[in-house]
Image (tube, rainbow, N blue to C red):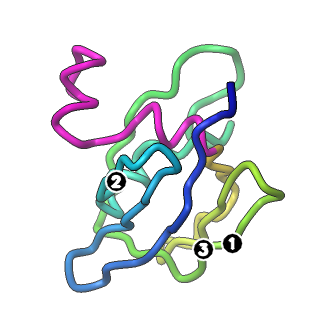
């Protein structure tokens, strides 16, 4: 089975979101602060193999740049100067903020 991957990633600055269209037809809008809050880097999450926890940014952020990391992830350079998080596509899908995905997870991520 082929893994689900983005077919399009686009900024929506007026809405302060990143829209991701997925290869299975799903689409979702990720708020910038939501993405920054789920930064998976060790500096934000600590070292260890636990689940990534939401850490609210101190102030609103926006991505200065969004870059591909190989063919499996993207990285951001945020307006708060943070830039070490690598957001794997499977991770992004696992934190999808749409109502359907949140209900399937049974959480408030």
**Mark 3, secondary structure of its residue:** strand
Location of the C terminus by quadrant is: top left
Residue stretch in magenta: 89-109
Q: Which residue is mark 3?
A: 66
Q: Which residue is label 2 attached to?
A: 27
Q: Is residue 27 left or right of residue 23?
A: left
Residue at the location (40% across, 35% down)?
Answer: 95
Horizontal and vertical percent for residue 27? 34, 53
Tell me the residue that label 1 is attached to.
67
What number is the disc on residue 93? none
Q: Earlier in the sequence, mark 2 or mark 3?
A: 2
> Are the residues at dot 3 and dot 1 in contact (C-beta closer than 8 Å)?
yes
Q: CA distance from mark 1 to mark 2?
A: 20 Å
Using residue 2 as the reference point, say whether residue 78 is left or right of it.
left
C-alpha separation, residue under disc 3 versus residue under disc 1: 4 Å
Q: Residues within 10 Å of mark 1 (few under 14, many from 20)?
A: few
Identify the secondary structure beneath mark 2.
strand
The residues tagged by marks 2 and 3 sit, at their Cα atoms, a distance apart of 18 Å
């Amino acid at each position: 089975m082929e893994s689900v991957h983005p077919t399009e990633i686009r900024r929506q600055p007026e809405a302060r979101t990143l829209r991701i269209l997925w290869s299975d037809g799903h689409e979702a809008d990720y708020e910038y602060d939501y993405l920054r809050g789920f930064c998976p880097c060790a500096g934000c999450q600590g070292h260890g193999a636990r689940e990534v926890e939401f850490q609210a940014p101190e102030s609103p952020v926006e991505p200065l740049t969004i870059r591909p990391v190989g063919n499996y992830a993207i990285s951001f350079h945020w307006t708060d100067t943070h830039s070490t998080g690598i957001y794997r596509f499977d991770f992004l899908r696992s934190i999808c903020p749409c109502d359907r995905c949140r209900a399937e997870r049974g959480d408030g991520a």
